[in-house]
Amino acid sequence: MAHTYNAHFVPFIFSTKDRRDTIPAELQEQRWAYLLGIANNLKIKLLAAGGTTNHVHLLLGWPPTIGAAAAVQKFKANSSRWLGEHGIEF
C-alpha cells in the first residue's frame, strides 16, 4: 500500500505593535526555545526561528491537523504571555 505524505512549509512573521523595539535582545534565545515548545505542543515542526527586537520569523512544517488561524493565535498569545511574565509590556 502506498503512503501519503504532506509537506507544507509556512513562513510565519509577527511583530510588536507599531514595530516598537520592546523585545530585549538578551531574551531572544530563550524566546525561540519557548516558541519551539509551543510548536511541539501543537505538533508543528519548527524548522527555523529568528527575528529582532521588534519581530519574529518562523519557518514551520505545517501538519494538516491544525488550521492556520488557530495556530497563529496560539503562537502569538503564548509568546506574548511569556514576554509579559518577563516584565515586558506591549
Image (cartoon, helix red, strand yellow):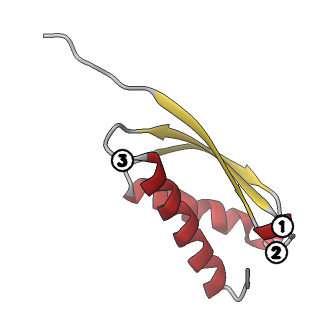
Secondary element type, mark 3? loop
Compare marks 1 and 3 and give the one earlier in the sequence. 1
Residue at which label 3 appears: 66
Q: Is residue 3 left or right of residue 65?
A: left
Q: Which label is found at residue 18?
A: 1
Residue 8, above or below 55: above
Task: Name the residue: 39% across, 47% down.
Answer: 67
Task: Name the residue: 37% across, 26% down.
Answer: 6
Image x and y of residue 27, in percent:
74, 72
Image x and y of residue 56, in percent:
71, 56
Kindly tell me whether residue 59 is visible in this rendering: yes
Q: Is residue 59 left or right of residue 16?
A: left
CA separation, marks 1 and 3?
A: 29 Å
- Residue sticking out furthest to the left: 1
CA separation, marks 2 and 1?
A: 10 Å
Task: Name the residue: 54% across, 41% down.
Answer: 60
Q: Which label is found at residue 22?
A: 2
Secondary element type, mark 2? loop
Secondary element type, mark 1? helix
Q: Nearer the viewer, mark 1 or mark 3?
A: 1
Q: Residues within 10 Å of mark 3 (few under 14, many from 20)?
A: few
Q: Residues within 10 Å of mark 1 (few under 14, many from 20)?
A: few
CA separation, marks 3 and 2?
A: 30 Å
Amino acid type, residue under disc 3 in the picture: Ile
Task: Name the residue: 82% across, 58% down.
Answer: 52
Q: Which label is found at residue 52?
A: none
